[in-house]
Image: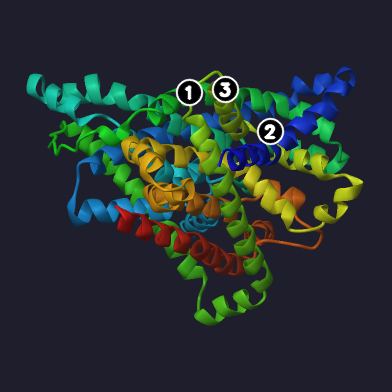
Amino acid sequence: MKAFSRIGEAVYLLVVAGPVLMLALTSLPRAPELWELAFPRGQSLNLLSNSLVLATAVALSDLVCGTLIAVFLWRRSGRLGGGLRLLVLLTAPLPPYIHALAWIFAFDTVNFRALTGLVGAWWVEVMAYLPLSTCLALLALEMVQPDLLEAGKLLAPDQRVLTRILGPLATPFAAAGAGLIFLLCLLEYGVPSIFGAATYPLEIYAEFSSSGDPARVFFMALPLFAAAALVLLATFAGYRGSALNRAWSRPGVDLPFHWPAWLRWAQGAALLLLAAQVIVPVATILTLTKSLAMLGQVLAFSTAETRVSFQVSLLASLLSLSLGAVVAHRLRQPGPMQALWWAVVVLPLALPASLVGAGLIDLWNRPSMLALQRTWAMPVLAATARFAPVATLVILVQLSRTDPRLLEAAAILAPSRIRAWVGVRIPLLLPGLLASAGLVFILTAGELATTLMVVPPGGSTLVLKVYNYLHYGSTETVAALCLLLTLATLLPGAVVVRLVRRRK
């Protein structure tokens, strides 16, 4: 099994870190002539400022709203709590482009023209990432030890328990969630470009499209990577501490809380936003997709894109799952290499999508690899390079919630390591494995930026088709395509949620 682990770690380094490392090796010798690109000036500096302001505004807005909703759901059981949790889980995977179409149509219907530029991009991204923010905030609350809250309730009113105990203990993990949303917005150019908001990632993509020089992309992306890495390292320190703790040993205690009136009003406003986040996209898509015949017609001329999207997402999720499982176990092993492996897993999350795409092209653009360049293996590698770290972190959380005594007993008592894995380890880790595979599948189905750079000539995916049609203004066709994309993301999510619940 050690040999298998070493092979998995080597493949992880090649797929995830290899493209950017190769790009750095080929670009740094040209530093004297290209170094000035790493210091934005004039228009480039304005674009970088736009990206930072937009990402910060979205992250803070979603942190506040998501936390309010999570506090409402935290101790709620029954049909209302369960239904809202399921709603949040199922709407989290919807790609931002679907929200963009929905809100453009909704505001045009009421003749409200303010949804343009950075304001429009901010609103749509807040709506798109609100379910994700809620899930992460809810997870942060679940990581708090109930016995500490129980002790606090004996000595102080609920409001003080909230501000003195619950808030400080949940903040590190919640900050990691806000940092993740910051990264998603900072490195994204699809939604801002739809609303005509110029941002720095779009400038990087435009540079590669015009020059085709990966070295120029590398130096232009350094400021964006530096900003993303600083936020990532600052916020994910709390995630690392939470992920390595023994969450499995925490007893469940049902503690009723009575929140102040101002918090209940704020929760009501946040829940209204969550309702709008669900109702507007669903109503828009169903309104614009006027009939099943229209949907069937769009499906007929999108069969190839649908099939390719499914295949790429499936292969990327399986590859990310395999590599993530190996590296997640590596992150749990103490020693001098643990910090290095954390950097290998976390820092790729700060890489702009255009930089990953340029690195993939630079890495595999070799005479012996030209056949690979023209196949759908490149989008699979691109999605794995971007989302294998996410799969690794999800599996790591599942490992932290697994009683290590069961794993130790299996290692001692099982007749072979294979029996220990098949009979004990895999069943115990199955919820995390399913969640990571489903998450990567959904993220890959909605991935645009890197796929746009490495897609084979003449090829397309559903999300590429949606993005192109959004710019052409074919509203009804876009709505039908969005419905297909919604089904492609919701159905795997619903299956994963169902399987995870059955395993608990």
Q: Which residue is mark 3?
A: 337
Of residue 472 and residue 309, the one placed in the foreground of this image is: 309
Q: Which residue is mark 2?
A: 200
Q: Which residue is mark 1?
A: 334
Give left or right: position of 203 versus 347: right
Would you call the spot at circle 2 few (<14 residues within 10 Å), some (14-19), or many (20 or more)? many
Could you tell me the amino acid type at mark 2? Tyr
Instruction: Tell me what residue is drawn at x 56 percent, y 69 percent.
Output: 480
Could you tell me the amino acid type at mark 3? Met
Would you call the spot at circle 1 few (<14 residues within 10 Å), some (14-19), or many (20 or more)? few
Q: CA distance from mark 1 to mark 2?
A: 39 Å
Could you tell me the amino acid type at mark 1? Pro
Q: Quadrant of the N terminus?
A: top right
Mark closest to the chain's N terminus, 1 or 2: 2
Give left or right: position of 31 versus 201: right
Q: Are marks 1 and 3 in contact (CB under 8 Å)?
A: no
- Labels 3, 2: front one: 3
Q: What is the x, y in percent for residue 70?
A: 30, 40
- Label 2 secondary element: helix
Of residue 208 and residue 261, the one placed in the foreground of this image is: 208
Mark closest to the chain's N terminus, 3 or 2: 2
